[in-house]
């Protein structure tokens, strides 16, 4: 099967499983609440803050002609900077105090999503990272509008949907970049299998991240301070909160 076709078909399987997951069923059936959405935004902040740096890390492993793609890869990574803050701004638009969010740990189900691309890049095939990116770029363009409709029905105001709207529209251009990366970087059967595997894993871990957030909204767990983050902030907690929500 042609590389692009096989990757597309992996994504279609993955998004179908994603839509059948408990979290997405909660959204589709109208049982999602504002509290669920707030908890999801916190977790989106946590994974999205790592994404530009993970993408740059993947480029460290490009060899030979792969290096011709470093510039476009890093430009793409740079364009993702600040998307974490959109999630915090959405949370602030819902009246939440976001001061503590950057200073605390993500939920276990979120760190699983974040840890996977680090693992894929550093301990497996770095080209497989493209599968992580592929799922994240294609999921909102495939169905972001229906997610937004579900959230609006649940009472979420438009002003708190900036992260989702941004990714429903801007990621259309990023989908085109994905086609380019696949054409340039997926050179072997092993690369192709790694990309398809990563699409599969990312879809499942994203669904679990959403489910973990929803469960936390119902039974909040104590959030430990993330000392590595706190130690590197020079501003006060309230300044961090207002800067993050700006
Ligand atoms: Fe983004
Ligand atoms: Fe993107």
Image (spheres, rainbow, N blue to C red):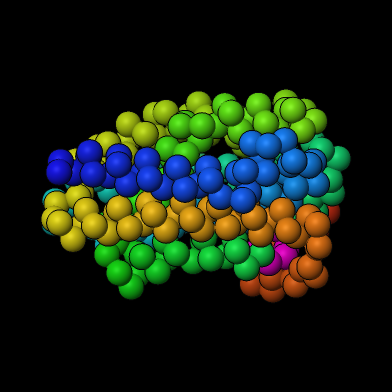
Q: In this picture, is 135 found above or below 29?
A: below
Q: In this picture, is 55 found above or below 159?
A: below
Q: Residue at x 32, y 46 (%)?
A: 10
In this orientation, does residue 241 appear?
Answer: no
In the rendered view of the protein, which quadrant contains the N terminus? Answer: top left
Quadrant housing residue 135: top left
Q: Is the magenta stretch mostly helix, strand or loop?
A: loop
Quadrant housing residue 146: top right
In this orientation, does residue 147 appear?
Answer: yes
Q: In this picture, is 158 found above or below 96?
A: above
Question: Which residue range is magenta in the image?
Answer: 102-106
Q: In this view, does 190 lie to the left or right of 209?
A: left
Q: Residue at x 84, y 49 (%)?
A: 97
Quadrant housing residue 128: bottom left
Nearest to the observer: residue 203 or residue 26: 26
The image position of residue 28, as x and y in percent, is 64, 36
Q: Which residue is drawn at 58% across and 58% down?
A: 208
Nearest to the observer: residue 223 or residue 31: 31
Numbered circles on residues, count: 0
The image position of residue 172, as x and y in percent, is 42, 28
In the rendered view of the protein, which quadrant contains the C terminus? Answer: top right
Nearest to the observer: residue 10 or residue 176: 10
The image position of residue 163, as x and y in percent, is 62, 36
The image position of residue 57, as x and y in percent, is 38, 60
Q: Is residue 121 magenta?
A: no
Q: In this view, does 117 lie to the left or right of 217?
A: left
Q: In this view, does 186 lie to the left or right of 142?
A: left
Q: In this picture, is 194 found above or below 227?
A: above
Q: Residue at x 86, y 40 (%)?
A: 95
Q: Is residue 102 left or right of residue 207?
A: right
């Amino acid at each position: 099967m042609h590389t692009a076709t096989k990757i597309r078909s992996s994504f279609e399987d993955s998004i179908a499983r994603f839509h059948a997951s408990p979290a997405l069923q909660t959204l589709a059936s109208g049982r999602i609440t504002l509290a669920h959405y707030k908890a999801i935004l916190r977790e989106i902040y946590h994974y999205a803050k790592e994404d530009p740096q993970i993408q740059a890390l993947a480029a460290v492993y490009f060899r030979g002609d792969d290096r011709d793609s470093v510039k476009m890869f890093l430009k793409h990574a740079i364009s993702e900077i600040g998307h974490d803050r959109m999630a915090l701004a959405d949370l602030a638009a819902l009246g939440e105090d976001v001061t503590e969010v950057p200073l605390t740990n993500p939920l276990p189900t979120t760190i699983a999503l974040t840890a996977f691309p680090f693992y894929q890049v550093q301990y497996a095939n770095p080209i497989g990272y493209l599968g992580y990116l592929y799922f994240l770029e294609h999921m909102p363009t495939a169905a972001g509008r229906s997610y937004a409709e579900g959230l609006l029905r649940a009472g979420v105001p438009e002003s708190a949907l900036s992260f989702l709207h941004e990714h429903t529209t801007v990621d259309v251009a990023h989908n085109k970049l994905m086609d380019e990366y696949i054409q340039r970087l997926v050179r072997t059967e092993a690369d192709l299998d790694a990309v398809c595997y990563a699409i599969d894993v990312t879809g499942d871990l994203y669904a679990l991240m959403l489910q973990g957030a929803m469960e936390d909204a119902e039974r909040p767990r104590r959030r430990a301070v993330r000392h590595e983050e706190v130690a590197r902030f020079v501003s006060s907690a309230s300044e961090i909160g207002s800067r993050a929500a700006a």
